[in-house]
């Protein structure tokens, strides 16, 4: 498939999507969001893929939704754009496999929201995070108010949303917006190192963990514990569980087959 706004690369079990509209610092227009959506279709169909990395080309991860395209939108068009973007981001969040954001630079507005819908965020210390929407006279449209508050707490989220303050990777790490901030030069090797660490585990169990955390986080504790219990039980229908436990008793490394 030909993409104009993203790069789609598969190496081994890892797919990397690089947001790539350098003339607009990878800002998300409708076409970029559509390509992201199509890329998710491809990923869902490829049984050999076990992990997705999302990053950006050049000095930006994503500098937000495309302000030029948004500026003339009617209320109906804004609602449709917001719904489409939010749906694509929700698809990323619900993708069965783990998704790591490698935040290389500006992650503003929709860019910060894209990073937040990923499971894990590793940032360059040079990365810049912020939700500048109120400075444009709008609210975030891709669930930023919700995910930011869940990640950093409502007080810090409101401070960032109300003030449009921009923070770097280290500060983002300090407040829990990213898992880890690293020197810019080692960002991708850190991300792929983490990816390999994850890929060495039982992928069905990894996926169930993602599902348990996501679904459990959105419900009450009793229901969440039921979700975990059911997924735990399902692991015992897999070859991976037999292999993982046999390997332990035989004191060797497990060779998981994702079955
Ligand atoms: N959209 C369109 N073009 C952008 C852009 C953006 N978000 N960000 C940068 N560009 C373009 C610039 O216009 C410039 O284009 P030319 O002038 O060269 O043609 C080019 O990228 C390079 O940018 P700069 O020259 O400005 O580069 P600098 O290094 O000087 O500055 C910057 C980098 C990231 C600080 C600056 O570009 C900047 O402030 N960009 C805007 C950042 C921003 O405000 N992002 C948040 C966008 S708002 C909703 C749906 C979605 C959303 C909200 C509601 N609903 C429908 C309800 C989401 C909103 C947002 O994401």
Image: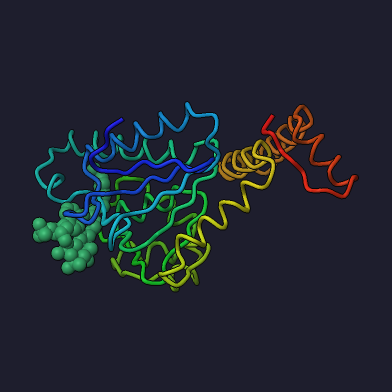
Dividing the picture into quadrants, the one containing residue 137 is: bottom left
> Which residue is drawn at the image coordinates 45% and 56% (left, top)?
149
Above or below, 122 relative to 167: above
Q: Nearer the viewer, residue 186 or 81?
A: 186
Q: How many marks?
A: 0
| Image x and y of residue 197, in percent | 63, 53
Describe residue 253's horizontal placement relative to residue 144 as left or right: right
Of the four image quadrants, the one with ligand 1 is bottom left
Q: At x 18% / y 33%, what residue is drawn? A: 76
Viewer-side residue, 94 vs 253? 253
Asked whether the viewer can see residue 66, the reply is yes
User: What is the x, y in percent for residue 231?
Assistant: 70, 34
Q: Where is residue 53 in the image (x, y as percent from the top left)?
A: 45, 48
Please determine whether, in this image, residue 243 is positioned above or below residue 65: above
Quadrant of the frame with the C terminus? top right
Residue lying farthest right? 249
């Amino acid at each position: 498939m030909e993409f104009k706004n993203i790069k789609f690369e598969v190496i081994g079990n890892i797919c990397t999507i690089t947001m790539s509209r350098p003339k607009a610092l990878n800002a998300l227009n409708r076409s970029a969001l559509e390509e992201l959506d199509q890329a998710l279709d491809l990923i869902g169909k490829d049984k050999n893929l076990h992990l997705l990395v999302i990053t950006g080309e050049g000095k930006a991860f994503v500098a937000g939704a495309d302000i030029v395209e948004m500026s003339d939108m009617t209320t109906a068009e804004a609602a449709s754009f917001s719904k489409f973007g939010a749906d694509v981001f929700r698809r990323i969040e619900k993708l069965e496999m783990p998704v790591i954001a490698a935040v290389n630079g500006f992650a503003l507005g929709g860019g910060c929201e894209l990073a937040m819908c990923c499971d894990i965020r590793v940032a360059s210390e040079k990365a810049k995070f912020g939700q500048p929407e109120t400075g444009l006279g709008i609210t975030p449209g891709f669930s930023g108010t919700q995910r930011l508050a869940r990640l950093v707490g409502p007080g810090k989220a409101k401070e960032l949303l109300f003030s449009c303050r921009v923070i770097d990777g280290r500060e983002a790490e300090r407040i829990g917006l990213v898992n880890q901030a690293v020197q810019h030069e080692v960002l991708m090797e850190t991300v792929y190192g983490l990816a390999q660490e994850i890929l060495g585990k039982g992928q069905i169990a990894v996926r169930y963990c993602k599902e348990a955390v996501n679904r459990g986080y959105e419900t009450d504790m009793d229901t969440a514990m039921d979700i975990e219990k059911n997924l735990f039980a399902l692991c015992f229908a897999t070859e991976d569980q037999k292999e993982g436990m046999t390997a332990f008793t035989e004191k060797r490394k497990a060779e998981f087959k994702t079955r």
